[in-house]
Image: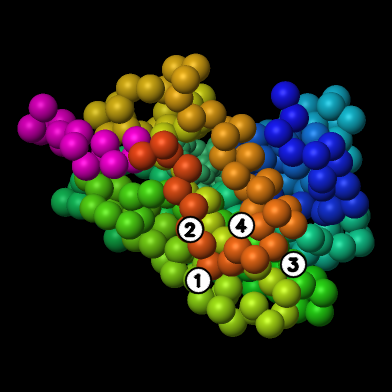
Amino acid sequence: MNIFADNIMKDKVVLITGGATGIGKGIATLMGQYGASVMIASRKQPVLERTVDDLKALAIDADYCVCDIRDPAAVEELMKTVRARFGSLDVLVNNAAGNFPAAMDQLSPNGFKTVVDIDLNGTFNMTKGAFDHFFKSVGGNIINISAPFAGWGVAYQAHAAAAKAGIDSLTRSCAVEWQSLGIRVNAVAPGAVSNTEGLERLSEALVGSNNGSTDACQAEDIANSVLFLASDAARFISGEIIRVDSATGVDLLKIPMPADA
Ligand code: NAP
């Protein structure tokens, strides 16, 4: 069922980090089905290739670029590749992230740094790259993928919560600084999303047991929210963090840590 008008993203170019898997692939697929040309970027070429094949099988104009978003030089090359392949950029979706469950007393400085580097610094690098190469002269649209627990305490996710809280802050600051340039910056904060690697990696004790359940949140539910924010229907929305979890994220607070269970 089409929720939005057909071809609502026609002639738009969308760049999605981590677009080969999970939620990112859901966003790439939905954007493409509504007419966008799609560039996906992450580190593993075979995974990127497979997803681009899947997108092309749906008649979506899609391509990929291998890029580690922690590396500003690689991000520069990615922006040049987008320019060479599609000529412009309309929407950047900062979706790539790293995560693993770890209690604070087990979390190494390197583990904390790795997640902050991918999630927060990677989002910064991509945002700067898209601004410098495309958006500063013609405007644009940035949608960051956050998480509800950035706004409250959560066990075993101090690293991810800190990184996502930084992303939320960056979202609001960029929205204010760039409002006059016609650049909107928002975030979508998904709760637990079924059938994603991200959810698989986290223990059931942390996220509950709805993985795979058909009435749980699906990647498409997140993609629909991203598409709404990318569309003109949201033309006066900027600096917002939209939680898409049907309030289930609040349950994270109630789940006992394994040691107490
Ligand atoms: P996922 O499938 O593990 O996706 C993460 C993606 O990021 C992968 O495609 C990965 O590809 C890419 N990536 C990781 N490090 C990278 C790097 N240094 N440079 C470029 N790309 C990199 O996870 P997901 O569950 O779909 O999550 C997607 C987003 O939603 C994340 O921001 C996550 O925090 C957020 N989220 C997910 C859930 C959930 O329930 N799944 C809940 C709340 C928030 P490579 O390994 O090939 O680089």
Dot 4 falls on a residue whose secondary structure is: strand
In the rendered image, residue 249 lying in the magenta stretch gets the answer yes
Which comes sooner in the sequence, label 2 or label 1?
Answer: 1
Which comes sooner in the sequence, label 4 or label 2?
Answer: 4
Disc 1 residue crowd, few under 14, some 14–19, many 20+, Cα 10 Å: some
What is the spatial separation of the Cα atoms under label 3 and label 4, in whole angstroms? 10 Å
The residue singled out by tag 3 in the image is 140
Span shown in magenta: 248-261
Question: Does residue 67 appear left or right of residue 222 in this picture?
Answer: right
Which comes sooner in the sequence, label 1 or label 3?
Answer: 3
For the N terminus, the image quarter is top right
Percent position (x, y) of residue 234? 66, 57
Tag 1 near tag 3, CB within 8 Å: no
What is the spatial separation of the Cα atoms under label 2 and label 1, in whole angstroms? 8 Å
Disc 2 residue crowd, few under 14, some 14–19, many 20+, Cα 10 Å: many
The residue lying at 59 percent from left, 82 percent from top is 177
The residue singled out by tag 2 in the image is 241
Q: Amino acid at mark 1?
A: Arg
Tag 4 near tag 1, CB within 8 Å: no
- Most frequent secondary structure within the magenta stretch: helix
The residue singled out by tag 1 in the image is 172
